[in-house]
Image (cartoon, rainbow, N blue to C red):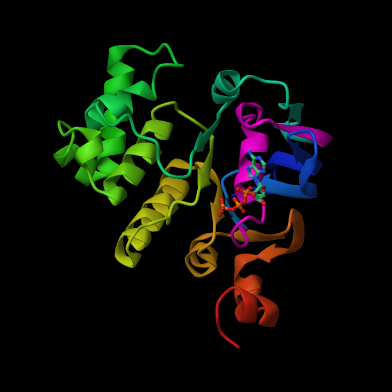
Amino acid sequence: RTDEMILEVNNIEVIYNHVILVLKGVSLSVPKGGITALLGGNGAGKTTTLKAISNLLKSERGEVTKGSILYRGKRVQDLMPSDLVKTGVIQVMEGRHCFEHLTVEENLLTGAYTRGSSRGEIDADLNMVYDYFPRLKERRRSQAGYTSGGEQQMVAIGRALMSRPETILLDEPSMGLAPQLVEQIFNIVKSLNEKEGYTFLLAEQNTNVALRFAHYGYILESGRVVMDGPAAALRENPDVKEFYLGMS
Ligand code: ATP
């Protein structure tokens, strides 16, 4: 990890349908090679923040009306999502979104389409994904729609890896998964971060698990950052303990 901030969100406002102000000036910095968590309850604005970064708001009639988003110091707000992928940022959407009728392997291969790489390079990346997710190798010929929720989450992350990203925006990876699987997915995220150097920004309602794996956290409430700090400090903070970790 370095202190270089690869992604910077400066005081952004997001409005849906021209009237509903959902983000009211959110700022955050994501260091290269770190795992940064975006925390907060239902409706706090986590997904909106990720979609603002990856420029996916338009289809929901949302718009960044103030502030700036910089990736490697360059404004990325006006890039098409596919161009953003080429600059190295990819979002894994909440709810996983596999192509249900394709096999696991075909789903993974769809992640490589923006790259124009050779078959050899793509095969090497496929093997890297299978090294991290041995379960996907076992299931590679299965139709994705028939795999479990945990496997579909793995497919979604694996497909993102196939685009050779630098920074991965992960929306609610724990959603709908049993605790043991959540642990497994987060352990894989951790080793992808440590061994391959991927930068992660992840949105999570599960504060407990996110603060065990992340290096730094931001807590959102009603479209504002109300607290931020190193994960270890947040875990010990009395307010975080009471309101987000269910201890007091
Ligand atoms: P969740 O855990 O539900 O994903 P979140 O913290 O990610 O929560 P967002 O999905 O960003 O929250 O939603 C923030 C607020 O914006 C909510 O009040 C939600 O109702 C509102 N919102 C989200 N999408 C839209 C939309 N397309 N149009 C209008 N309002 C929206």
Q: Looking at the image, how many numbered discs can be counted on the residues?
A: 0
If the image is split into quadrants, where does the C terminus sit?
bottom right
Q: Residue at x 63, y 59 (%)?
A: 216
Looking at the picture, does residue 120 appear above or below residue 142? above
Q: Residue at x 73, y 58 (%)?
A: 222
**Residue 79 percent coordinates (x, y):** 67, 20
Nearer-the-camera pick, 150 or 116: 150
Of all residues, the one furthest to the bottom in this rendering is 248
**Residue 153 percent coordinates (x, y):** 35, 45
Nearer-the-camera pick, 70 or 174: 174
Looking at the picture, does residue 49 appear above or below residue 35? above
Q: Magenta segment, which residues? A: 39-67
Nearer-the-camera pick, 82 or 222: 222
Left or right, 109 with reference to 115: left
Looking at the picture, does residue 185 appear above or below residue 136? below
Residue 54 drawn in magenta: yes
**Residue 122 percent coordinates (x, y):** 32, 20
Q: Hey, which quadrant is residue 48 in on the image? A: top right
Left or right, 74 with reference to 190: right
**Residue 220 percent coordinates (x, y):** 69, 59
Q: Hey, which quadrant is residue 161 in on the image? A: top left
Nearer-the-camera pick, 122 or 102: 102
Left or right, 22 with reference to 84: right
Residue 44 drawn in magenta: yes
Q: Hey, which quadrant is residue 180 in on the image? A: bottom left
